[in-house]
Image (tube, rainbow, N blue to C red):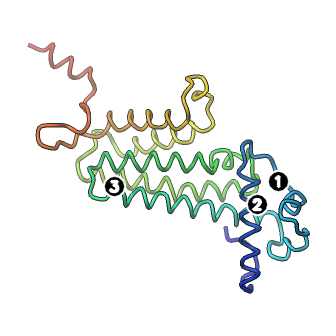
Amino acid sequence: METNSVSRVSEGDERRVDVIVEAAGRLLFTPGFAPVSMDELARELGMSKKTIYRHFPDKRSLLAAVLDRQFAAVEDALAAAAEGTEGQPFDVRVQRFLVAAGTELGRIGAAQLATGRGGDAMLRQYVEQRVDTVIYRRIDELFRHGHREGLLAAPPELLFEITRGALERLFTSRLPHALDWTAADLLRATVDTVLYGAIRPTRTGDDARLGAAIPAARDDDKEASP
């Protein structure tokens, strides 16, 4: 979804647009995601609604501009995570990317926005599409790459569905509160579970980077066999 803001503006107007979008982002992405009215935004900015509407003809276009900025920041963070693990073993690359993705999804409240709880329900489809493009397609590509390299002990499609479900559920679940863990801690534990049970160990010398990728039950069966 493209914003409907004025396409040709002076430098002063561009700065004003930035100020409006920044303020709207602060109000929109506060804890609880309470709906923000244009009156509240105008008071926050100390300007008239007429001035805001000159750049953004409706609330939907303003919220889209805010989300465009949020997802641009998400893409930058994920690109940095990918660059930081370039040349690293596959398990390290996946782990860092998943933790970064989950952290960014939680930061912008993507799960709440995508379900219409907070922000604007009209933008639900837009949020879902951006999350799919920015996060999930890249996760899918990572797992498919691992499959091509012979590094996965499970189908990449299965790993993708498990991982996607975990990311989406963790940030709307009460489990972190029940376990007295932060959502980030729970996410790391989930990522470790997916990785250690799915990726064959990358060995350096005589040491394995990961624990046994084959389930323990199979090891027990092997030991019990004559």
The quarter of the picture where the N terminus appears is bottom right
**Callout 2, which amino acid?**
Ala
In the rendered structure, the answer to whether residue 226 lies left or right of residue 66 reads left
Q: Pick whichever, 26 or 55, lies toward us.
A: 26
Circle 1/circle 2 CB separation < 8 Å: yes
Compared with residue 172, is residue 134 higher up or lower down, i.e. above or below?
A: below
Dot label at residue 24 = 2
In the rendered structure, the answer to whether residue 134 lies left or right of residue 5 reads left
Circle 3/circle 2 CB separation < 8 Å: no
Compared with residue 52, is residue 161 higher up or lower down, i.e. above or below?
A: above
Q: Quadrant of residue 106?
A: top right
Q: Residue at x 15, y 16 (%)?
A: 223
Dot label at residue 111 = none
For the residue carrying disc 1, how many other residues have a C-alpha within 10 Å: few (<14), some (14-19), or many (20+)? some
Instruction: Give me the C-alpha separation between circle 3 and circle 1.
Output: 39 Å
**Residue 99 x/y as whole percent:** 45, 45
**Residue 66 x/y as whole percent:** 69, 63
Dot label at residue 85 = 3
**Callout 1, which amino acid?**
Val
In the rendered structure, the answer to whether residue 174 lies left or right of residue 137 reads right
Instruction: Give me the C-alpha separation between circle 1 and circle 2.
Output: 8 Å
The local secondary structure at tag 2 comes to helix
Q: Quadrant of residue 171?
A: top right
Instruction: Give me the C-alpha separation between circle 3 and circle 2.
Output: 34 Å
Q: How many marks?
A: 3
For the residue carrying disc 3, how many other residues have a C-alpha within 10 Å: few (<14), some (14-19), or many (20+)? some
The local secondary structure at tag 3 comes to loop
Comes first in the chain, label 3 or label 2: 2
- The residue under label 1 is 36
Instruction: Specify the farthest residue to the left.
Output: 226
